[in-house]
Image (spheres, helix red, strand yellow):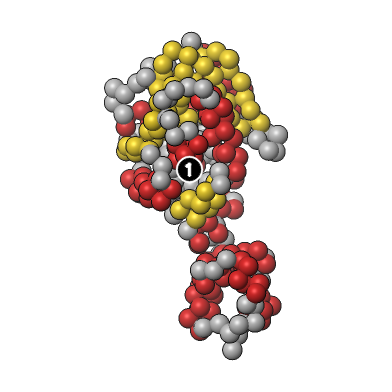
Amino acid sequence: MACLRTMSRDSTLPRLEMQMLWQHVLQVPRSWLIAHDTDPLEPGAIIRFRELEARRMAGEPMAYIVGCREFMGHDFQVSPAVLIPRPETELLVETGLDYLKGKQSPLVLDLGTGSGAVAISIALRCPAATVVATDLSGDALAVARTNGRRLGAKVDFFQGSWYDALPGRKGFDLIVSNPPYIAAADSHLKEGDVRFEPAAALTDGSDGLSALRVIIEGAGRRLLSHGALFVEHGWDQAQAVRQLLQSTGFGQVASAPDLAGIDRVTGGIYN
């Protein structure tokens, strides 16, 4: 009967990905795989592994196959209805949290929440905050609400397009967003994991700046005086985003680089 050791010789997947799939199939930690690599495998487990292996070989992201992705130290459930949380987006959370330091009972808005990773991470790290999150997709909000319940985060979720999800709501100390910012003509939309992710969460179908314009131009009417807005954007959009912020009444406008040294998050304080 086959065992993990013999199966590893037959698989063309990278070792780490193979281990992740076996952990998912057998519902065991990695340490168990190492200690039991010669144990016989049940035929049903082998069939299930081969099914998942075929999906990965076809290019499907590991996060969708195993149904989760780590972000800010927590495992978030994901599905093809939401973007897969990425390490560079942790910078958006950290920037927002830095701004909230010392504020009592701040009101925070996350626009286009997807899996809820940003909103939930802020709520967990700043429990004094009231966090509100929106998304146009009902399927995405279902994933976000599930993550909120699982992780014990207090976040109120609303469905709608950007600020339209919260008509008349204002007085926010902080607004954050990781909107679709890839231009429709960008070749990266046909490469790697993004081929499987929801297009509406990746691209605005235009120049990559239209969602950012809506968010920036509408922020002043929703923020408190001296409230802050921070947005994630593309590798070549920092200057354009800074100009948008400056032209709509924001001061102290600045960009922050991600771990690759690319300006990834830009924001400012509303005067």
Kindly tell me whether residue 143 is visible in this rendering: no
Quarter of the view holding residue 246? top right
Q: Note whether 86 is above or below 261 in the view shown.
A: below
| Pick the front one: 249 or 5 | 5
Kind of residue at badge 1 = Ala
Report the number of numbered marks.
1
Relative depth, front residue between 11 and 36: 36
Q: List x then y, in percent, for residue 236.
A: 63, 31
Q: Say above or below: 112 vs 217.
A: below
| x and y percentages locating residue 212 in the rendered image | 48, 28
Furthest-bottom residue in this view: 1
Residue in the picture at 63% in, 67% down: 31
Drawn side of residue 162 relative to residue 267, left or right: left
> Can residue 87 be seen in the rendering of this structure?
yes
Q: Residues within 10 Å of mark 1 (few under 14, many from 20)?
A: many
66 up-or-down from 252: above or below: below
Instruction: Give coordinates of residue 195: x percent, y percent.
Output: 53, 52
Picture quarter with the N terminus: bottom right
Q: Going 46% across and 18% down the picture, which residue do you hit? A: 227
Q: Which residue is mark 1?
A: 117
Q: Residue at x 33, y 45 (%)?
A: 138
Task: Please tell me in which quadrant of the rendered image residue 2 appears.
Answer: bottom right
Q: Residue at x 54, y 19 (%)?
A: 268
User: What x and y, as percent, mark residue 139?
Assistant: 35, 49
Q: Secondary structure at mark 1?
A: helix
* Residue that lies at the very extreme toward the left in this rendered image: 167
Q: Is residue 173 left or right of residue 89?
A: left
